Image (cartoon, helix red, strand yellow):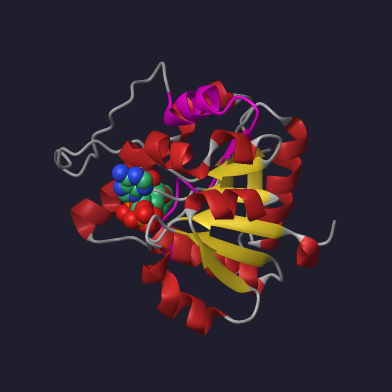
Amino acid sequence: MTSQATKVGVFGSGQVGETLANGFIKHGYQVMRASRSPEKLAAWKAGAGERASTGSPAEAARFAELFVLAVKGGAAETALEACGVKNLAGKVVIDTTNPLADAPPENGVLKFFTNLDQSLLERLQRQAPDAHLVKAFSCVGNALMVNPDFGGTKPSMFICGNHSAAKEKVVEVLVRFGWEVEDMGGAEAARAIEPLCMLWCIPGFKQNRWTHAFKLLKK
Ligand SMILES: NC(=O)c1ccc[n+]([C@@H]2O[C@H](COP(=O)([O-])OP(=O)(O)OC[C@H]3O[C@@H](n4cnc5c(N)ncnc54)[C@H](OP(=O)(O)O)[C@@H]3O)[C@@H](O)[C@H]2O)c1
């Protein structure tokens, strides 16, 4: 399947939804962007070109060959329900979410509502057992998600998920989006990947530095 043929559903009216929807359009995909109130995406649709459309979460899930969940972490399970779990069966679902608690950061360190023995991705995968969830894009700020410029160095994107073919499709996307992909294995690896968001945000909260990305050095 070529990227031109791939239909992508993006549930996310926030910055991540917008950035990734625009990234997919830039790379030739067809995108249906979703919100519980799709009318609030009208201005985006008007400016995003002929490959862009909007809809409800369930409409986007039905439309999608590849789906992106870009919703508030604390609402991710409710959001998945709104998509209709059966509409995502057999499909690749990129999970960008982070399990941020409502409490404020403590000395620059975000608080999570999960723990080190259970990630949000695992909870979502249990909720939608026939969907093929892949964690990606969770460990970098949205401004750097699509073709970030680090002077020729490709930053690392950590991914995980239980379905190998789904991860291959996500790798294809990430390579187009300018990333070197580090596959950390099955869904449990999200217990380690999701907290990278906490680490990524510390220089932001402490020094207002938001323009970095992780790089795994190897030899
Ligand atoms: N911001 C970043 O740079 C960044 C970077 C990496 C990862 N992330 C993660 O990516 C996700 C999206 O972040 P964001 O900053 O773009 O936006 P956000 O404000 O965290 O989420 C906005 C989205 O959440 C949905 N939502 C909120 N409450 C809901 C509920 N009760 N039921 C169903 N849906 C609900 C909204 O749906 P409606 O459209 O229907 O209102 C909207 O589409 C988050 O999990 C975040 O932690 C963010």
- Looking at the picture, tell me which residue is in the foreground, 27 or 149: 27
Left/right of residue 203 with respect to residue 10 in the rendered view? left
Number of labelled discs?
Answer: 0
Image coordinates of residue 117 in percent, x first then y, are 41, 16
- Looking at the picture, tell me which residue is in the foreground, 162 or 69: 69
Q: Is residue 200 visible?
A: no
- Looking at the picture, tell me which residue is in the foreground, 153 or 165: 165
Does 165 appear above or below 8? above
Residue in the picture at 49% in, 83% down: 46
Q: Is residue 53 visible?
A: yes
Image coordinates of residue 104 in percent, x first then y, are 15, 42
Residue in the picture at 23% in, 34% down: 111
Image coordinates of residue 58 in percent, x first then y, are 53, 49
Q: Check residue 43 for magenta coloring.
A: no
Farthest residue to the top: give it.
Answer: 117
Locate residue 148: give its quadrant. bottom right
Locate residue 5: give its quadrant. bottom right
Question: Magenta segment, which residues?
Answer: 119-143
